[in-house]
Image (tube, helix red, strand yellow):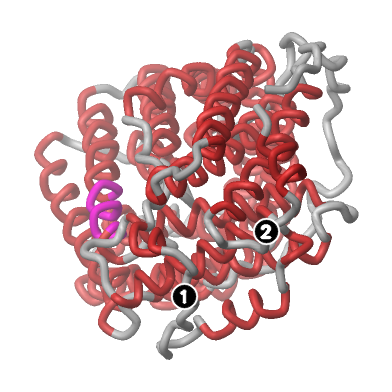
Amino acid sequence: MSSAPPTPSAPPARRLPLAGVLRLAKPSEIWFKPALSVVAAIAPPAFTLLALGRLDLVMYAMAGSLCALYAHSRPYAARARVLVRVVLGMLGGLGVALVAASLTGSAVVLVTVGALLAAAQKVLCDATRVGPPGNVVLTFVSSASLFAPQTLAQVPGHLALAAATGAWAWLVCMAPALVRPHGPERRATAAALKAAAGYADTGGTGEGHDRARAAGYTAVQAAWQSLLSTSAPSRTRRALERLVVRAEVALAAPAQAEAGRLRAWAGSLRGTGPVPETGLPHAAADELLGVAAARPLWSRLGPLTPLAARTALGCALAGYASLALGIGRPYWALVTAASLYQANIALTWSRAVQRVVGNVVGVLVFLAVVPLAHLGPAALVLCCLAFSFGAEVLISRNYWLGSVCVTPMALLITEFAGYQEAGTLMRERVVDTVVGALVGFAAAVAVTNRRAGDRVERALAAADRAREHTARLLAEPDPAPTALESARRGLAVALSELRATADAAAGEWWQRALPQERVVLAEQSGHRTLAATARRQGLLPERDPATETEDARP
């Protein structure tokens, strides 16, 4: 453990960033998967209802079809389970909304129900780490349903339609397993290798090496989670595990890593060809342990309490403000507020800017396509399909760019029950967006998250314990290979979680100064210990014993 005094750094400047908020990133490598899946999930039910003359039911059909947006990065065994949970969660929120809509016409009560549903959906999606698009789609479905005319007698039929399209979405998302059963694991492993190569390019000391190292460990942990969520071990999975170990070793000793070889291995994982065999030099290669087991769900709910409070308060106030302004669709303001809340205030501000810009531009796009969409019911359905595809193509570049397509799609969905005056729709959408963003962000500022500093302290303690345990094993004359492998992996996980926790806390307001110096020292000593452990395992060339002892000293 470092002997440096635990002097906290000065509080970081609390600035609301503007530079870079709208900057475009590279598209996701699998952008086409959710884009094609959502079109395949929406089109058959929508055209069936079109043929039956019941486009007024498309909203309920789309509730299930939109579940096709989830879990595309997960292996198929895990994807099957996650999608079932998503569909059940969607049906639960939709059921509550429909029953509430049938029992009361009070807009204030309905907004309150919507806000509580939004908070529950946010917490459960974050706690279960369901992944993009998170709670936003579920909140959109339940909130819109709250303000749809409804009777109790209609609820079972609408839920049955949503369940049927949810089952169809499940089949659409699982279909690629017939062609490329190990595709998600291969992509996750390739991402880990590429991230490790990026860190190797810095040599561990070059410009941006801290960000590259954090990205590398995040990608490696994601790869382990992907591999360990598969069912029975297979030859392909074992080969992929060895490649992830190679990525870990490169992160531990970037100066000795061959970035070109890492990228070549990553490139060979495309398609369905054989996985490169990269033998490991000791018996522990047959006992790869992966990452530590995930914490139980209940233990992840506590830290999300401030986020739940922000979501409930912000969504409720946004809906009430919309009602006070006489807007007929307060759920738009509610959903805008629900979409803002991220890990900290700084990220929430960025999302607010992106949401407003994307929605305003999207309203202008809606104005341009209204004449085409009003050519007939089939044109309306085709426009919705085009925008659903475009949203998934663009949203990985930046959230605001995806919102440019999401906004006109949401406006067109309101017209399935009958065409409406475009000017009114556009005005209400812009007002609700601005109201939702302003009120939602104000709620995020008002509800402080003073626990962020405590979580950094706990993450520091966990990293110190993991490092000390690993160092004790290194000090033994003949540590068990499996124990050493498990300790190395546990230390890597602890350091990755420390960095994520520190980054999240750095973007929060109204908290005590964070121990930034201690975090940096813990990371430096931890990564030296990781390198020493890899050498002890025979994964790296040996160094001078005195130097190795220095690296691993607790």
Amino acid type at mark 1: Gly
Magenta span has 531? no
Residue 428, above or below 457: below
Magenta span has 85? yes
Q: Position of residue 273 (x, y in %)?
A: 43, 90
Q: Is residue 9 left or right of residue 182?
A: right
Q: Which residues are magenta?
A: 78-86
Q: Position of residue 278 (x, y in %)?
A: 49, 77
Disc 2 on helix, strand or loop?
loop
Q: Residues within 10 Å of mark 1 (few under 14, many from 20)?
A: few
Q: Position of residue 321 (x, y in %)?
A: 59, 21
The disc label shown at residue 279, or none: 1
Q: Position of residue 141 (x, y in %)?
A: 37, 45
Residue drawn at x 76%, y 29% is 521
Cα separation, mark 1 vs mark 2, equals: 18 Å
Q: Is residue 503 left or right of residue 52?
A: right
Name the quadrant of the C terminus. Answer: top right
Observer-nearest residue: 491 or 109? 491
Secondary structure mostly seen in magenta is: helix
Residue 50, located in which quarter of the rendered image? bottom left
Residue under label 2: 542
Residue 437, located in which quarter of the rendered image? top right
Name the quadrant of the N terminus. Answer: top right
Disc 1 on helix, strand or loop?
loop
